[in-house]
Amino acid sequence: MTTVDLAQVPQRLATGAFILNSGLQKWSGDEETAAGLHGFASGTYPFLKDMDPPTFLKALAVGEMAVGGTLLAPFVPGRLAGLVLSGFSAGMLGLYLRTPGMHDGNFRPTQQGTPIAKDIWMLGIGVALVLGNGARRAERKAERRVAKAEKRAAIAELKAGKKAEKLAARN
């Protein structure tokens, strides 16, 4: 069973709800929305050109709902949620970096690029979720080692006591 790290709850709740809501809105998007988003994405990612816009919009909506749901689900480990969010945000940042007119030569966002450039916060949260478990995992591992060592010591003490009893009984 996975326990929820309370320090991750605000990050996961805010980001998950935001992305889930975005996916739900896209799910009921119209033809114009589908065409606009498809044109934008397929300009950056050419493999999407063969997909028709409504199908693209539904796939994008499902993807966003899955990412949002993963972040909101308390049984999903933080590291996995972080990996999912990092992958999603990397795709968004790819749009920002590869689409002409989104940024100046120094990667500062233009007015057109600001709505996507701000999504870098998702990458930061995703990486924090992945890395945030490292210290906690090391602590739990050390606790398990101590518990095993204590158990071995108790067993050895018990065996030594039994041997001492047998020797005393012989004498």
Image (cartoon, rainbow, N blue to C red):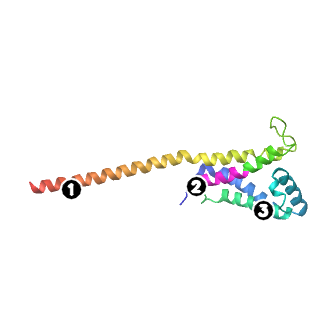
CB atoms at circles 2 and 1 under 8 Å apart? no
Residue position marked by numbered label 2 in the rendering: 4
Query: Magenta span has 103?
Result: no
CA distance for labels 1 and 3:
68 Å
Magenta stretch, residue numbers: 78-88
Marks 1 and 3, the one that precedes in the sequence = 3
Disc 1: CA contacts within 10 A as few (<14), some (14-19) or many (>=20): few
Tell me the chief SS of the magenta region: helix
Instruction: Please name which of the two marks, 2 or 3, marks the residue nearer to the observer.
Output: 3
Residue 29 figure quarter: bottom right
Q: Amino acid at mark 3?
A: Ala
| Secondary structure found at label 3 | helix
CB atoms at circles 2 and 3 under 8 Å apart? no
Q: Residue at x 77, y 58 (%)?
A: 21
Residue 107 figure quarter: top right
- 27 sits to left or right of 79: right
Disc 2: CA contacts within 10 A as few (<14), some (14-19) or many (>=20): some
- 121 sits to left or right of 132: right
CA distance for labels 2 and 1:
44 Å
Instruction: Give the image location of residue 32, x and y in percent.
Output: 91, 60
- 142 sits to left or right of 86: left
Which of the labelled discs sits on residue 59, or is there none? Answer: 3
Q: Amino acid at mark 1?
A: Lys
Which of the labelled discs sits on residue 162, or is there none? Answer: 1
Front-most of residues 44 and 71 = 44
Query: Magenta span has 84?
Result: yes
Q: Residue at x 47, y 49 (%)?
A: 141
Q: Amino acid at mark 2?
A: Val
Marks 2 and 1, the one that precedes in the sequence = 2
Instruction: Give the image location of residue 31, x and y in percent.
Output: 89, 63
